[in-house]
Amino acid sequence: MKAGQFIGRGQAKVETEINQLKERSRIAAEVEDTTSWGTDVTPQVEGDIQNVEVTVDTSTESNQGRRRTLSENDFFDILSKKVSEKEVQFVHLLMRDMDNLGCDIIWRQAAFVVRYPDPLGSGKMMTLFVVRKQGDVYPGWLVPQLKALDIPVQIGLDYVARTAKVMGVKVKGTNPDTWTEYVRLSKVQANYTEFLDEVERLIGLLQDYSSE
């Protein structure tokens, strides 16, 4: 192999690792403090990065004045440029339905998070799914949250698997509390009745557990 070819491949590998690192940092910023009570952030990025260490500081002091939480108006202004008006109206409907189910809408830097309060009354919240300003949806963080609350994690694993089936995607093997891909709002809308059924089923199981 010629020296130039070796250097070219080496540079390509470095550029790939840098791009993956940037993607980790972007997603970590996007879902800052998604777990509600912890400081661990697990970016959902396909593929492994060897010999690259990523540290994300989600403390209040370090982020104060550096990251801005979206307002509801900001979110919809951005979303309206990414998706159709029909999908924008669908998100309004989704938010109303989640509110009627007793969920909270938490606004973040680049998304809103739908959470359900701990039925055992600890005041902690469980993440059901995230809606990004880019116009897509994914679940995440529910399993470790359930574990921290001493609620059977199988409840969360089943929820992710069942919603993945509804959306026609797969559960991520290395992180089974999320899907292998973001799902566009148009697809969520097309399968909304079944998706809402699964959200209601999950909430019902959580409520049943709290009453045992």
Image (cartoon, helix red, strand yellow):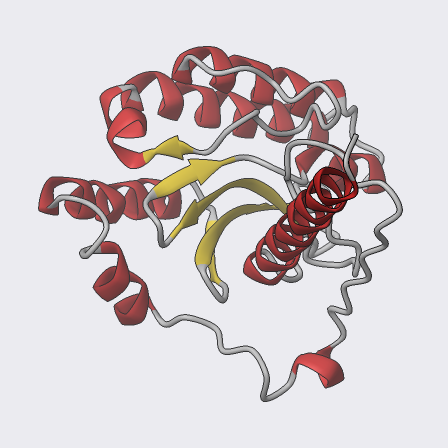
Task: State the image coordinates of residue 112 (x, y, percent, origin top left).
Answer: 44, 55
Residue drawn at the location 84% of the way across and 51% of the way down: 52
Q: Residue furthest front?
A: 2
The answer to which of 54 and 49 lies nearer the viewer is 49
The answer to which of 142 and 12 lies nearer the viewer is 12
The answer to which of 34 and 42 lies nearer the viewer is 42
Side (left or right) of 86 relative to 108? left
Residue drawn at the location 76% of the way across and 74% of the way down: 59
Tell me: residue 156, above or below residue 133.
above
Residue drawn at the location 69% of the way across and 56% of the way down: 123
Task: State the image coordinates of residue 41 (x, y, percent, origin top left).
Answer: 73, 53
Tell me: residue 22, above or below residue 136.
below
- Rendering quarter of residue 74: bottom left
Tell me: residue 67, above or below residue 147.
below
Side (left or right) of 152 relative to 75? right
Task: State the image coordinates of residue 47 (x, y, percent, origin top left).
Answer: 70, 31
> Quarter holding the C terminus?
top right
Side (left or right) of 167 relative to 185? right
Task: State the image coordinates of residue 175 (x, y, percent, origin top left).
Answer: 72, 28
Side (left or right) of 126 relative to 83? right
The answer to which of 43 and 130 lies nearer the viewer is 43
